[in-house]
Image (cartoon, coloured by chain):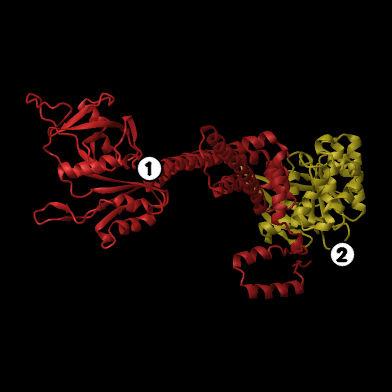
Chain colours: A red, B yellow
Amino acid sequence: MTEQVAEPTSTGRRSWRGLRSRLRIPARLRRRREAAAVPGVPPVHPADRFRFADLLGEATADIGSRPGRLVTTIVGTVLGIAALIATIGFAQTAAGQIARQFDRTAATQLVVTPTTADTRGGATVAAAALPWDAVPRLERLAGVESAALLAEVPLPEAVIAAVPVNDPSQPPTAPPPVYAASAELLDTVGGRLATGRFLDAGHDTRADRVVVLGSRAADRLGVHRVDTQPSIFIDGIAYAVLGIVESTDVRAELLNAVLLPTGTARADFGLRAPGDAQARIAIGAGPQLRTQAALALAPDEPDSLEVNAPDGRSELGQDVQADVNGVFVILSVIVLLAGGVGITNVTMLSVMERVGEIGLRRAIGATRRQIAGQFVAESVVIGLLGGLIGATLGVFAVIGISLVRDWTPVIDPWIAVGGALLGAVLGLVAGGLPARRAAAIEPVDALRGGT
Amino acid sequence: MTAPATAPIPIATPGTTPAIELRDVTRSFPGPPEVQALKGVSVTVADGEYVSIIGPSGSGKSTMLNILGLLDRPTVGEYRLNGVLTSALEEDERAAVRARQLGFVFQAFHLMSRRSVLENVLLPMLYNGTPRAERESRAREALHRVGLDHRIGFLPGTLSGGERQRVAVARAVASRPRVLLADEPTGNLDQTTSAEIMALFEELHADGLTLVVITHDGAVARRASRRIRLADGRVSEAG
């Protein structure tokens, strides 16, 4: 008796060789392809081979048949992905809120100051001077909502007190700083008055001897109400207190200060030039105003002025968003890993339970790769399902809580899509070990179990 | 008729290529203690023959079926299936041969409990390259042949033991194997149902299918055209 060595049909062999030489298929893949031509077994038409669609069909056929098991398998992924999406969503939403708060203040403030230069004696002096009409010049620029002048009046030796008595027994204390301010300052810095009124243009023009106190300066001077028309004394000269500033959005140092009209500071203390010009601008106008403001205030020498204007969005807000994202993502990844371990455990249990089925499939012709592929595909489908449910829950959690807290929900749509895909990747990784275990099962051993 | 343990058993239809040819097959399981489940067995089964392998528990019947079904490999010796030396086949090639040339019927049925009768019968055709367009018609034809047309949408759990085994037979023959291997096919069935299954096997044999039935039941074994008796891993009697 001669050994029967089956050869594939000569036509098929020739065309296959031709194709191989044309495509230069790698040797490993070639061997796998040629395995389809088994001695003694007629070759199978490629269309009738076990394909990816068959794998997917087998992987999904039984997934819903045990709802309890499916829930147990999927719950870890659902929670992990939901937590991931929700935390990223909350981080983005919270960062959006935080950024919005910063943007409302930091991103809407522009400050113009003269550049400085060092003198031979080592002192630092202003290299240029802001014009006294800086306010109307700035307010003509698009994007400037309000502008004001501010200058510190250097009075290091001055005695500032609420009563005209010089008590030598009192310990010496530093006087509160004195600033010259234009009438628009309160609006520009987002200030709120505790009592009284702020300076106006008339005080400036007339150089009236009036002041407005910051809340802490008022405490130091013992002035708490203005309806009694109190005055303070600067080097013995009386200034009527018009009001007390309770708070400001920016330049909190003004709360420690005594604010004079600029006209008064020029008349009484010889103030020569404004120290800086402060402007409240529209969000996003910073980059454009950075150049325009310098040109508006010093058209002949714009470089002599330094303009401090925010970028489109406050950098601080973006930093906060990045920090918050980082922390939340780490927490979510930990939750997700727990979900992955859950899938691995339940899939491993499933492999052990389905030993008989694995044996049957192997007996009727499934290869180890097909068995492994089926378990990986099942795991991927379960992971994808968990990812989809988790991503949906996460998005709804962000929207729901944002609605309750009156926030604007912010979530990148790609995060939700990525969350679902991450579930599939998690399934792929988590299914690897059980699939290897399933593929390694010998059919003889497996058939001893039930199906 | 008694044959020496190492001598090939005469084939029933001389002149054709044997479907199964075992030559001096030994299967050892490493110990300790090492167990020799088959000891120099030589058996030939002709194409289209109906053979039963009978023997007491521990005689090596299941080991022999596992080797015949390419689920296990001989430690020593040669096994040719339809003339092809199976020891030369790679793992994937053995799977392909199982898929396209062999059918299995097990004592425990091994039906997938969450798949319908039709889906169970379709399962082997997923792996053996049966043309897609023909799969369902072949499955229905096989179920018709075993008398289960009316049960195609049922789950195996709702069927009687005899019906389940008939589903298993339909599954084994739907993909048109050249050899059907049955391991204690009536082991879980009552006498009446066993007789039905054996009648079914006789019909398949009459159609030209090669059948190897492993059993410890003398009545079942006698239905075959030839019996091979195994004892302590050796062929003790053939006829």
Subunit that carries the residue with mark 1: A
Q: Which residue is mark 1?
A: A105
Q: Residue at x 38, y 55 (%)?
A: A287
Instruction: Name the spot of residue B166 as percent of width and height, x first.
Output: 86, 43
Amino acid type assigned to the residue bearing label 1 in the image: Thr
CB atoms of marks 1 and 2 within 8 Å:
no
Amino acid type assigned to the residue bearing label 2 in the image: Gly
Q: Which residue is mark 2?
A: B15
Q: Is residue A306 visible?
A: yes
Seen in the picture, residue A172 relative to A284 is either above or below; the reply is above
Closer-to-camera residue (A19/A114): A114
Of circles 1 and 2, the one toward us is 1
Instruction: Name the spot of residue B203 as percent of width and height, x first.
Output: 92, 49
Q: Which mark is residue B42?
A: none
Single out the residue that lies furthest toward the left. A168
Image quadrant for the N terminus of chain A?
bottom right
* Disc 1: CA contacts within 10 A as few (<14), some (14-19) or many (>=20): some
Q: CA distance from mark 1 to mark 2?
A: 101 Å
> Residue A170 falls in which quadrant of the image?
top left
Subunit that carries the residue with mark 2: B
Q: Secondary structure at mark 1?
A: helix
